[in-house]
Image (tube, rainbow, N blue to C red):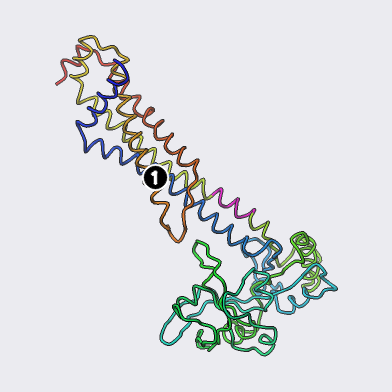
Amino acid sequence: MNPFQTLRFALGGLAANKVRSALTMLGVLIGVAAVILLLAVGNGSSQAVKDSIEKLGTNALTVSSGSGFGGGRSGSATGTKPLTVEDARALADPAAAPHIESVAPEVTTSQTALYEGTSHTVGQVVGTYPAYFKASNSKVAKGDYFSADDVLASRKVAVIGSTTAAGLFGTADPVGRKVVLGGTPLTVVGVLAAKGGTGFQDPDDVVVAPLPTVQNAFTGFGSVGQILVEAESAGATAEAQNEITTVLMGRHGIKDPAALDFRVSSQASLLTTQESTNRTFTVLLGAVAAISLLVGGIGITNIMLVTVTERTREIGIRKAIGAPRGVILGQFLAESTLLSLIGGGLGVAAGLIGAHFTIAGIKPVVIPESVVGAFAIAVVIGLFFGGYPANRAASLRPIEALRHE
């Protein structure tokens, strides 16, 4: 029997049980689509974080409290000193830190903003200095930044993000208008250009105001959450990081470099940590998706075993009139492979279509290798899991098959 006849018989066998064949293909479809989509979500999440980090600029450094990456100790909990505005001023001293261009202490909170009856919950309210805008690569699209005089006078002014502007003002120009943020009226002096990005936190949903204004209204005049430092250039970040460590060790009375109560993060270190985390995340997602493919393969075995049982007399008749073992084996392998081929092809289509939608706030980014790999694995699964039922059919003795009721 030539390959075309084998294929024709296989298609006929699948068409004889359309619903059963469709459900088996659905199992493979879900497995392939899950592999493509879950890996795409992992890749999209990684890309979103990477873009957000890179938008800060290559010469930005972040100083935050705690001894470990992830926040470990706080000053109030362990007796160590939290970061303060005075720490930021010491870092801004050119004599102590000549490789530092600018310093911006930050406090952050979240509040609800109101404008003429419209309410919008702002994801991040930042109290800081004007140097924050340059260090964080934040540019205004309308209006202007607040100034150092605004900080000194604790003026109630703010620069808002594009998402916040759209949520409160729609298409109207926000510049010069007053919003009430957590009970405090603020005059909008500028609107930041959209940074974009995907993920759980919108970088454009932000209100940036002078540090003393936010402290007076919301956080109090205590410690600051972090200090954003801009090095003179991308090549001076290592020197700037050393200067930060030296200055803060002196201010905090620390003599042992292994006992720091603060940490300094550069964009390079954040990217390295993020890439490592993403690899683990992607492997876990791939493992979960692979289980779906395995279940689909088990479904193929189950259905093909049922098919062999139902067609035992047919197999006996064909073997009795001279059909060799290879023909029977080839027919049932062809059927199982067709199930995985068609299911895998539909799964690829479903995965690629699904990747056009935002999932849990993340825009999936398809990995081409995952598409090819998932489809290839689906075909291999069809061959592997269809092998046992096909071999069982080919091993039937004609006399026993003909006696089967």
Location of residue 100 (image quadrant): bottom right
The three-letter code of the residue at mark 1 reads Ala
Main secondary structure of the magenta stretch: helix
Compared with residue 232, is residue 368 higher up or lower down, i.e. above or below?
Answer: above
User: Is the C terminus in the top left, top right, bottom left or bottom right quadrant?
Assistant: top left
Q: Residues within 10 Å of mark 1 (few under 14, many from 20)?
A: many
Q: Secondary structure beneath disc 1?
A: helix
User: Is the N terminus in the top left, top right, bottom left or bottom right quadrant?
Assistant: top left
Compared with residue 147, is residue 38 higher up or lower down, i.e. above or below?
Answer: above
Q: Nearer the viewer, residue 68 or 234?
A: 234
Residue at 19% x, 26% y is: 310
Which x, y percent locates residue 357? Answer: 41, 56
Which x, y percent locates residue 314? Answer: 19, 19
Is residue 18 left or right of 181 when viewed as pictured?
left
Q: Residue furthest left?
A: 405
Find out whether residue 273 is within the magenta segment.
yes
Q: How many numbered tags mark residues here?
A: 1
Residue at 69% x, 65% y is: 60
Q: Nearer the viewer, residue 260 or 147?
A: 147
Which x, y percent locates residue 228? Answer: 68, 70
Residue at 56% x, 71% y is: 193
Location of residue 86 (image quadrant): bottom right
Q: Nearer the viewer, residue 121 or 102?
A: 102
Which x, y percent locates residue 380? Answer: 41, 30
Q: Which residues are magenta?
A: 272-280
Residue at 54% x, 58% y is: 48
Is residue 74 left or right of 357 when viewed as pictured?
right
Find out whether residue 316 is within the magenta segment.
no
Residue receiving disc 1: 33
